[in-house]
Image (cartoon, coloured by chain):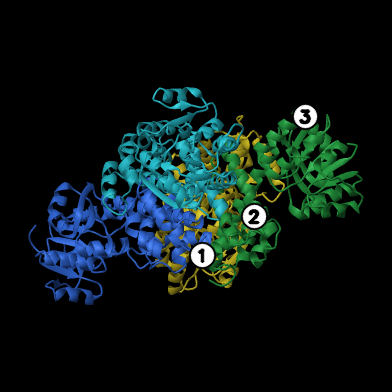
Chain colours: A cyan, B blue, C green, D yellow
Amino acid sequence: MTGKVGFVGLGIMGRPMARNLLAAGYELVVHNRSRGKAEGLAEEGASVADNPKEVAESCETVITMLSDSPQVEEVLAGENGVFEGVGEGALLVDMSTISPVVAKELAAEARERGASMLDAPVSGGEPGAEAGTLSIMVGGSVENFDRAQPLFEVMGTTVVHVGDSGTGQVVKACNQIVVALTIEAVSEALVLGSKAGVDPAKVIEVLSGGMAGNKVMEVRGEKFLKHEFDPGFKLELHRKDLGIALAAGREYGVPLPVTGIVDQVLEALVAKGLGAKDHSAILTFIEDLAQHKIGEGS
Amino acid sequence: MTGKVGFVGLGIMGRPMARNLLAAGYELVVHNRSRGKAEGLAEEGASVADNPKEVAESCETVITMLSDSPQVEEVLAGENGVFEGVGEGALLVDMSTISPVVAKELAAEARERGASMLDAPVSGGEPGAEAGTLSIMVGGSVENFDRAQPLFEVMGTTVVHVGDSGTGQVVKACNQIVVALTIEAVSEALVLGSKAGVDPAKVIEVLSGGMAGNKVMEVRGEKFLKHEFDPGFKLELHRKDLGIALAAGREYGVPLPVTGIVDQVLEALVAKGLGAKDHSAILTFIEDLAQHKIGEGS
Amino acid sequence: MTGKVGFVGLGIMGRPMARNLLAAGYELVVHNRSRGKAEGLAEEGASVADNPKEVAESCETVITMLSDSPQVEEVLAGENGVFEGVGEGALLVDMSTISPVVAKELAAEARERGASMLDAPVSGGEPGAEAGTLSIMVGGSVENFDRAQPLFEVMGTTVVHVGDSGTGQVVKACNQIVVALTIEAVSEALVLGSKAGVDPAKVIEVLSGGMAGNKVMEVRGEKFLKHEFDPGFKLELHRKDLGIALAAGREYGVPLPVTGIVDQVLEALVAKGLGAKDHSAILTFIEDLAQHKIGEGS
Amino acid sequence: MTGKVGFVGLGIMGRPMARNLLAAGYELVVHNRSRGKAEGLAEEGASVADNPKEVAESCETVITMLSDSPQVEEVLAGENGVFEGVGEGALLVDMSTISPVVAKELAAEARERGASMLDAPVSGGEPGAEAGTLSIMVGGSVENFDRAQPLFEVMGTTVVHVGDSGTGQVVKACNQIVVALTIEAVSEALVLGSKAGVDPAKVIEVLSGGMAGNKVMEVRGEKFLKHEFDPGFKLELHRKDLGIALAAGREYGVPLPVTGIVDQVLEALVAKGLGAKDHSAILTFIEDLAQHKIGEGS
């Protein structure tokens, strides 16, 4: 892949991803709503564009990394948006986590303008973005996947083509379901164990050895045990993602009973003002129900 | 640990566990309600006793491996039970999965008779029992844990002392919560992914690489994808175990909202006649709700 | 209230409501997307307008009765919509069931154009619309409520002003929560009772006499007992309404755990193809889980 | 019905029920575990027996009104229990709320001793017990129901024979499901309405007029609006009753998904120390989740 690469959206995730592309030698044209963040990257060699349209005019490939469906729609289809500047044959790569339905619609719109689009949401959070070790799940044609592959390999380690347009977002939704429900499961287990007199560290140790073993206990175990809930991955973002999953369930006709309940748990935690904490703070929901803080005697 | 070892309960799990002890050179006295199973072991060198009392009279250590709390209560405290024959200083090791409350009560009764007791439930299923690779979570005193250690090492690979009497059962309940909820989580994800057009094998592949990764997908992935639900671990046993977990939650004052829902899912599957299938058949519950069999187009 | 009254949306509900206004002597200007339904009313004395803008140009009061938020937004704020034709001082009365948030936004837009708006959703279904016995819950200013009162009294019997703009929709959402959860509650009770050997008619009889008594058993009792699920109120509309309620919960920060679960139950029934059945068909969800049809022995 | 009537269990419910029988002219022999309560009734004309056996020896009919299954089993089948003193042809009437399975077993035991048994749980609470206006749901033979009818008519106003032994308890379980789920439903509606800016009294007023109408809002409306949670019916008793319902669901193969969730809500409230409050305090669970007290602005 040659030519300039555009990058719109330089937030917590986008910034380190763009920086990794710069470091790998790509010529970058960046844009961010609040210009300050773009200028930071300019010092590292990126050009700054005034709006997404300008980005699209000068780049064959445009990556977007934004917070939710409406933002992606605005940046692509809004005034001075990417679609206004996009050239024949261009490749748009949306790495935001958004609705699979919106992702499909935008891909169709891109096609009408002679461009192509991939939905390529990631998991791995800020640390993964910085280290270039994200997991990237990609929906769209195989050809376009192959075109974007060199870029993906700079930003992530596990890069999988999962199907047609929208399916990257579908798999991301699946991922967020399993992570949220696993945190809930571990929370119920830890509070039961601890209030019944077992050291919660023992619970994690034993469960990790068998079929109950999961990555959540491995990666978030310390947070649970120390009640240290700095994000990591913000609870309010996970709630947004479950909202996407439930809307996808509705769209595709898939009832998701336990996801529906856990979504309300996240809702309650956000109402309690914990939206900016790590999603492992789901533990405190069960602790509140049981009136027991794990590790504090029974 | 020297002297004869008693073993009561030679079912699917107990039989291979006892056989491993025999193979390791232990002198075994066995008993099973239906005598046939005991006699099978006699051919391999075990002595057969007429009832649990006789077992206790001739052994310093007695292991029990039964189906549920009432069976353990009967074998220990019933007529011709272990308690009638137990000698001063004997060690009782219950490896069944039962109520933590019952486990504590039986340990107290054992103490009154000058004996000691450990609750030492296992996970790992029939394959683990046969291979001697069970996980064993042990509640009781450290001294008694040390006494039983040589036996545990014959039957399992991960052997952890988790606390006082009853805590082995507590940790087992925690384990069963996490496994059941993880199967539910993976099921919701797989059906959403598949009905939205993604190959379910891709969903498992991608999710396994990140924070959604878990042992359930690793060990049960094939069952999900092939709808091959021979047990493994029977759904009706998992339902029994969630019943124990919910009763423990009630006893210790720990609300378990999602466990409560998944228990009803298992209830529905048992009502459908799937109790003898593998617990991974939870997948079919979500498939029925969505009217979609994973892997069959969308 | 004098002057012509506009009425946009002549579906199952809107048509009999408009007809009642005609019968009460109001001069009506009507519009419907598919013109046929409007012409039916023309024979009864209504004038037919080509689009919502025309309706608004000739009427001081415009009632809308449409299926969901997007339709109301289109009719009011779309091309040739009401807002294009609305005069200073006009009163818009939206009687559709839509998002409270959208209702508030539209009311604000109306104000900017010098007009006023009430949200006035109804309950009581087609029979109530025909008989003029709807319940009408109204959000907006007291003055506007008083202005619309004569019209409401033609269409309904219980007409309550519940607060500012949007609150009519909020109360409607509350109503739909309670109705859906009551149907679920009665369904769980009926299937438990019947499978345990009790005549389900007896269950309804006894429960109706005490604190478990509710209007659902009174109005839907026969449907439950005879498995006669012609609507009444369509399941898929109730699902739409729970979607509005859950979105409102999200907007206002109110977790609704049981509503969240029952929403997934409705989702499952729609996936089974029962969306056009009466909402009392929720019963069949529990019957399927229990593999038992009420009234058919135990 | 002639002859003496025995009454065992003179708690909050039993005492006024017994007193009504005395007032109606019945000759009563009473027993209570703590003798004081029995002696209070002696002053009003009752004879006091030392134990249930003595009661049974002197009475053709024996009523029991106790807290749960184990207490009823003890009073009937325990040492110096009713079964030891019961005569051929006697009629036992258990009016406690217990497990339907236990009720059936006890009825079978009674039959073996030549006696008969009815399960006849009540609803209506302390006020209903005092006023003699209880609802009584009766399981057992029609003949025995007819025999006990005169007694029932003294204690209750709605008296319904619902089927064979155990079915009275089944219907009571159904009743408790519907009441608990209705309180939950009303709570979700009230908190949503209030936090979104509607006066909760308006919500109750409007909902009461239509299909959402129920007895819970009528009888408990004031408690909700004033946060006045003196019982009424204690939350911890309702939790006991849902435990019976869920166990019955398990026994008869009826999944009860929403009952399963609401049971955990009650569990959480008991863990918060609200077990002795009225069951309408379920409202505070949703209020806590939403961080909003109804009626206090939005």
Quarter where residue D151 is shown? bottom right
**Pointer 3 chain:** C
Q: If the image is split into quadrants, where does the N terminus of chain C sit?
A: top right
Camera-side residue of D94 and B167:
B167
Res C113 label: 3
Q: Nearer the viewer, mark 3 or mark 1?
A: 3
Res C236 label: 2
The residue beneath circle 1 is C290
Q: Are marks 3 and 2 on the same chain?
A: yes
Picture coordinates of residue B193, whole percent (x, y): 47, 54
| Three-letter residue code for mark 1 | Ala
Picture coordinates of residue A170, whole percent (x, y): 48, 49
| Three-letter residue code for mark 3 | Arg
Query: Within 10 Å of the Cα at label 3, are there few (<14), some (14-19), or many (20+) other Cα atoms?
Result: some
Q: Nearer the viewer, mark 2 or mark 1?
A: 2
Residue D72 visible: no
Task: Kindly state the secondary structure of the residue where label 1 is placed.
Answer: helix
Question: Closer to the N terminus: mark 3 or mark 2?
Answer: 3
| Three-letter residue code for mark 2 | Glu
Give the CA distance from mark 2 to mark 1.
23 Å
